[in-house]
Image (cartoon, rainbow, N blue to C red):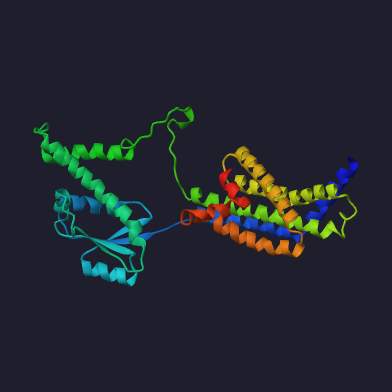
Amino acid sequence: MIKMLMWLRMLLKRQMKKVSIYIILVIMATVSFLLKYVADNFSVSIEIGIVNADSGEMAKAIEQEMRYKESIIGFRMFEDKEELLQAVRSGEVMGGYIFNAGFSEKLLSGDIIEAVEVLATPTNIIAKITNEVVFSIIMKELSYETLVSDTVDTSLFEKFTLDEIREELRQYYELNLSNGSTFSIKYNKESDELQDKVVNIDTYDYISPIIVGILGLLIFVAGLCGTISYYDDRDTGALCLLKENNKQLISVIQIAIPVIISSVISWGLLYGLSLEADGIYLARKLLVYSFIVILYCFALKTVVKNKHTYIGLIPIFILLCLIFCPIFINISSLVPNTVYISKLLPVYYLYLI
């Protein structure tokens, strides 16, 4: 037992003398803090030009909402088409929309041909993104006008003026849109934890998986670097006098030491920076992943006998993980068969845990 503890102590000291482990730990910390900083200071502003050539009530309501809408997309009002066209050409705005004369009547009658004109440069894809926002605002007002029209047609509110009907319906229409009354999900089993809960999607929902993926990749690289010690000691180093079974046990420990160290640091970074809220779940996840990486590196060194060949595979594995791991690029959605390549890499299983 004492000899085993001495071996472990010697192996730990040997691994801690390697520069590679410190480089990996520095990269881990740098990437985590840098992406956290980016998430904290993330700001995007896309400016879109609007020309309202229609005098209808619906066009006025849409223009009013666009003026005061708080979003990453901002709207600027222009007097005419020529002014807007010049702004699009010069890059002053990313694109533009023109509500032509008769816009309100055309939409209400279902005749949408030439009701809206979209302006964008040929190489600009922003219009495809902003279309969702702009036409959602249009549909919101169209739905309201349809509601007003249907209410007036019922003849149940004859004692109210049209303006009174519009004002009353607007109040309840906006309330239903804002409080979630227009959409609901029924769960088979209700949970107290789901009561009165609102799920907000923010920048961290996109940044966190990327940081986890990068840290997972670096844990894998730490395992690969740890394996190199086995090659150094296998024939001429401290392992050459041991029996084959003992050599294999020591090789597992040599792989495990940098993997465990980098996993512990990863846990501290993710939990300490509040990128992962559940520390126990995160610890279990990294523990399972570390076990996968250790087995993977052990199997790889068993197959690859030559040290230089093994070292040459490290950048290849890094590139494969970056390209085929769904955390970074879900290339299998474009080329389905590439998912089989992903399954040959340990980072893929971090995505599944």
Q: Is residue 221 visible?
A: yes
The image position of residue 300, as x and y in percent, is: 71, 54
Picture quadrant of residue 153: top left
Q: Residue at x 39, y 59 (%)?
A: 45
- Residue 312 placement (x, y as % from top left): 69, 64
Image height of 246 relative to 26, above or below: above
Locate residue 17, reporting x and y percent.
80, 57
Residue at position x 31%, y 61% from top?
Answer: 48
Q: What is the count of numbered marks?
A: 0
Q: Quadrant of residue 15?
A: bottom right
Q: Nearer the viewer, residue 228 or 338?
A: 338
Q: In the picture shown, does residue 268 fall above or below 195? A: below
Horizontally, residue 108 falls left or right of residue 14, namely left
Q: Quadrant of residue 169?
A: top left
- The percent position of residue 184, horizontal first and vertical second, equals 35, 35
Q: Is residue 330 visible?
A: no
Foreground of the two, 312 or 276: 312
Q: Is residue 304 left or right of residue 169?
A: right
Question: Which residue lies at the image location 69% right of the left edge and 45% below the top edge?
Answer: 291
152 and 297: which is toward the camera: 297
In percent of the image, x 16 and y 57: which residue is there?
Answer: 54
Viewer-side residue, 121 vs 293: 293
Give the quadrant of the N terminus. Answer: top right
Q: Quadrant of the C terminus?
A: top right
